[in-house]
Image (cartoon, rainbow, N blue to C red):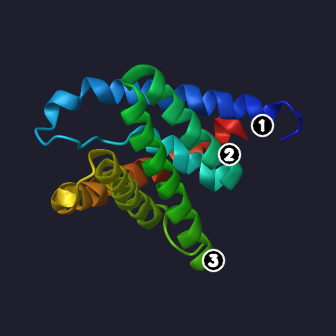
Amino acid sequence: MRYKAARPALLGLLFALSVVLNLVEAGFSGLVPIPGIKLGLSNVVTMYCLFCMGKREAFLLAGLKAFFVLLTRGLVGACLSLSGGLLSVAMMLLLKKLGRNRLSHTFLSISGGVSHNVGQISVAALILESSAVFYYLPVLMISGVGMGLLTGILLRQLLPYLNRIFF
Protein backbone atom coordinates (compact mmCIF):
# COMPACT_ATOMS: atom_id res chain seq x y z
CA MET A 1 0.00 0.00 0.00
CA ARG A 2 1.25 3.44 -0.88
CA TYR A 3 0.38 5.33 2.27
CA LYS A 4 1.23 4.47 5.86
CA ALA A 5 -2.34 5.16 6.98
CA ALA A 6 -3.83 2.93 4.29
CA ARG A 7 -3.34 -0.33 6.22
CA PRO A 8 -5.10 0.79 9.43
CA ALA A 9 -7.82 2.43 7.34
CA LEU A 10 -8.36 -0.80 5.40
CA LEU A 11 -8.47 -2.78 8.64
CA GLY A 12 -11.08 -0.36 9.96
CA LEU A 13 -13.16 -0.82 6.81
CA LEU A 14 -12.87 -4.59 7.09
CA PHE A 15 -13.92 -4.44 10.74
CA ALA A 16 -16.93 -2.30 9.81
CA LEU A 17 -17.82 -4.77 7.06
CA SER A 18 -17.59 -7.70 9.49
CA VAL A 19 -19.86 -5.86 11.96
CA VAL A 20 -22.44 -5.25 9.23
CA LEU A 21 -22.28 -8.89 8.12
CA ASN A 22 -22.64 -10.00 11.74
CA LEU A 23 -25.77 -7.86 12.10
CA VAL A 24 -27.19 -9.16 8.80
CA GLU A 25 -26.49 -12.69 9.98
CA ALA A 26 -28.33 -12.02 13.25
CA GLY A 27 -31.42 -11.29 11.17
CA PHE A 28 -31.26 -14.84 9.79
CA SER A 29 -30.78 -16.51 13.18
CA GLY A 30 -34.42 -17.62 13.35
CA LEU A 31 -34.10 -19.53 10.07
CA VAL A 32 -31.66 -22.07 11.54
CA PRO A 33 -33.57 -24.29 13.98
CA ILE A 34 -30.43 -25.63 15.70
CA PRO A 35 -29.07 -23.53 18.58
CA GLY A 36 -25.54 -22.19 18.19
CA ILE A 37 -25.44 -22.57 14.40
CA LYS A 38 -24.62 -19.39 12.49
CA LEU A 39 -23.76 -18.71 8.88
CA GLY A 40 -20.41 -17.12 9.73
CA LEU A 41 -20.63 -14.45 7.05
CA SER A 42 -18.23 -12.15 8.88
CA ASN A 43 -15.61 -14.91 8.71
CA VAL A 44 -15.30 -14.17 4.99
CA VAL A 45 -13.81 -10.84 6.04
CA THR A 46 -11.43 -12.48 8.51
CA MET A 47 -10.23 -14.90 5.85
CA TYR A 48 -9.75 -12.06 3.38
CA CYS A 49 -7.75 -10.23 6.01
CA LEU A 50 -5.57 -13.30 6.65
CA PHE A 51 -4.93 -14.10 3.00
CA CYS A 52 -4.49 -10.55 1.69
CA MET A 53 -3.18 -8.49 4.62
CA GLY A 54 -1.40 -10.89 6.96
CA LYS A 55 -1.57 -12.85 10.17
CA ARG A 56 -1.19 -9.88 12.54
CA GLU A 57 -4.13 -8.09 10.98
CA ALA A 58 -6.26 -11.26 10.96
CA PHE A 59 -5.64 -11.87 14.67
CA LEU A 60 -6.38 -8.21 15.37
CA LEU A 61 -9.62 -8.41 13.41
CA ALA A 62 -10.66 -11.52 15.37
CA GLY A 63 -10.00 -9.57 18.57
CA LEU A 64 -11.97 -6.56 17.35
CA LYS A 65 -14.90 -8.80 16.43
CA ALA A 66 -14.84 -10.27 19.95
CA PHE A 67 -14.83 -6.74 21.37
CA PHE A 68 -17.92 -5.94 19.31
CA VAL A 69 -19.57 -9.09 20.70
CA LEU A 70 -18.62 -7.94 24.22
CA LEU A 71 -20.44 -4.67 23.61
CA THR A 72 -23.53 -6.29 22.07
CA ARG A 73 -23.87 -9.70 23.75
CA GLY A 74 -21.78 -9.59 26.92
CA LEU A 75 -18.72 -11.25 28.40
CA VAL A 76 -19.61 -14.89 27.77
CA GLY A 77 -20.35 -14.19 24.12
CA ALA A 78 -17.08 -12.27 23.80
CA CYS A 79 -15.10 -15.16 25.33
CA LEU A 80 -16.74 -17.60 22.92
CA SER A 81 -16.11 -15.27 19.97
CA LEU A 82 -12.49 -14.65 20.92
CA SER A 83 -11.65 -18.32 21.49
CA GLY A 84 -13.32 -19.40 18.26
CA GLY A 85 -11.87 -16.55 16.22
CA LEU A 86 -8.30 -16.92 17.45
CA LEU A 87 -8.26 -20.71 17.07
CA SER A 88 -9.80 -20.43 13.62
CA VAL A 89 -7.19 -17.93 12.41
CA ALA A 90 -4.38 -19.96 13.99
CA MET A 91 -5.55 -23.18 12.32
CA MET A 92 -5.93 -21.57 8.90
CA LEU A 93 -2.50 -19.97 9.26
CA LEU A 94 -0.90 -23.27 10.32
CA LEU A 95 -2.48 -25.21 7.47
CA LYS A 96 -1.58 -22.46 5.01
CA LYS A 97 2.07 -22.71 6.07
CA LEU A 98 2.11 -26.51 6.09
CA GLY A 99 0.46 -26.63 2.68
CA ARG A 100 2.86 -24.00 1.34
CA ASN A 101 -0.07 -22.01 -0.07
CA ARG A 102 -1.26 -24.99 -2.14
CA LEU A 103 -4.41 -25.58 -0.10
CA SER A 104 -7.60 -24.03 -1.40
CA HIS A 105 -9.34 -21.18 0.35
CA THR A 106 -12.36 -23.45 0.70
CA PHE A 107 -10.39 -26.16 2.51
CA LEU A 108 -8.84 -23.55 4.81
CA SER A 109 -12.26 -22.06 5.43
CA ILE A 110 -13.72 -25.44 6.38
CA SER A 111 -10.78 -26.03 8.72
CA GLY A 112 -11.33 -22.59 10.20
CA GLY A 113 -15.05 -23.21 10.68
CA VAL A 114 -14.47 -26.50 12.47
CA SER A 115 -11.69 -24.96 14.60
CA HIS A 116 -13.94 -22.04 15.50
CA ASN A 117 -16.55 -24.42 16.87
CA VAL A 118 -13.96 -26.49 18.76
CA GLY A 119 -12.61 -23.33 20.38
CA GLN A 120 -16.07 -22.17 21.38
CA ILE A 121 -17.19 -25.51 22.79
CA SER A 122 -13.95 -25.80 24.77
CA VAL A 123 -14.47 -22.41 26.39
CA ALA A 124 -18.14 -23.24 27.01
CA ALA A 125 -16.99 -26.36 28.87
CA LEU A 126 -14.68 -24.22 31.02
CA ILE A 127 -17.37 -21.63 31.72
CA LEU A 128 -20.01 -24.23 32.56
CA GLU A 129 -17.48 -26.43 34.37
CA SER A 130 -18.90 -29.44 32.56
CA SER A 131 -17.64 -31.71 29.82
CA ALA A 132 -21.24 -32.53 28.87
CA VAL A 133 -21.19 -29.76 26.24
CA PHE A 134 -18.79 -31.86 24.17
CA TYR A 135 -21.75 -34.11 23.29
CA TYR A 136 -22.88 -31.22 21.09
CA LEU A 137 -19.53 -31.14 19.27
CA PRO A 138 -20.55 -33.49 16.42
CA VAL A 139 -23.43 -31.18 15.51
CA LEU A 140 -21.09 -28.18 15.59
CA MET A 141 -18.44 -30.02 13.56
CA ILE A 142 -20.96 -30.77 10.82
CA SER A 143 -22.13 -27.16 10.84
CA GLY A 144 -18.49 -26.01 10.79
CA VAL A 145 -17.90 -28.01 7.63
CA GLY A 146 -21.09 -26.72 6.00
CA MET A 147 -20.64 -23.08 6.95
CA GLY A 148 -16.89 -23.25 6.22
CA LEU A 149 -17.74 -24.53 2.75
CA LEU A 150 -20.21 -21.68 2.27
CA THR A 151 -17.80 -18.97 3.43
CA GLY A 152 -14.95 -20.47 1.40
CA ILE A 153 -17.04 -20.40 -1.76
CA LEU A 154 -18.19 -16.84 -0.98
CA LEU A 155 -14.60 -15.71 -0.49
CA ARG A 156 -13.48 -17.32 -3.74
CA GLN A 157 -16.28 -15.52 -5.60
CA LEU A 158 -15.72 -12.16 -3.89
CA LEU A 159 -11.91 -12.13 -3.88
CA PRO A 160 -11.45 -10.55 -7.34
CA TYR A 161 -13.90 -7.76 -6.48
CA LEU A 162 -12.45 -7.14 -3.02
CA ASN A 163 -8.94 -6.98 -4.42
CA ARG A 164 -10.07 -4.46 -7.01
CA ILE A 165 -11.63 -2.29 -4.31
CA PHE A 166 -8.88 -2.49 -1.71
CA PHE A 167 -5.67 -2.87 -3.74
Q: Determine if residue 42 is in view.
A: yes
User: Residue at the spot x=26%, y=56% of the render?
Assistant: 146
At label 1, counting other C-alpha atoms closer than 10 Å, the crowd grade (few under 14, some 14-19, many 20 or more) is some
Going by the numbered disc 3, the residue's amino acid type is Arg
**Residue 77 higher or lower than 47, as above or below:** above
Q: Is residue 106 left or right of residue 167?
A: left
Residue under numbered circle 1: 7
Residue under numbered circle 3: 100
Q: Position of residue 134 (x, y in %)?
A: 22, 60
Label 1, secondary structure: give it.
helix
Residue under numbered circle 2: 57
User: Residue at the spot x=57%, y=48% of the render?
Assistant: 48
Q: Position of residue 7 (x, y in %)?
A: 77, 37
Labels 2 and 3: the sequence-earlier one: 2
Instruction: Determine which quarter of the picture holds residue 6.
Output: top right
Going by the numbered disc 1, the residue's amino acid type is Arg
Viewer-nearest of discs 2 and 3: 2
Q: State if disc 1 and disc 2 touch (CB < 8 Å).
A: yes
| Number of numbered markers | 3
Q: CA distance from mark 3 to mark 1?
A: 25 Å
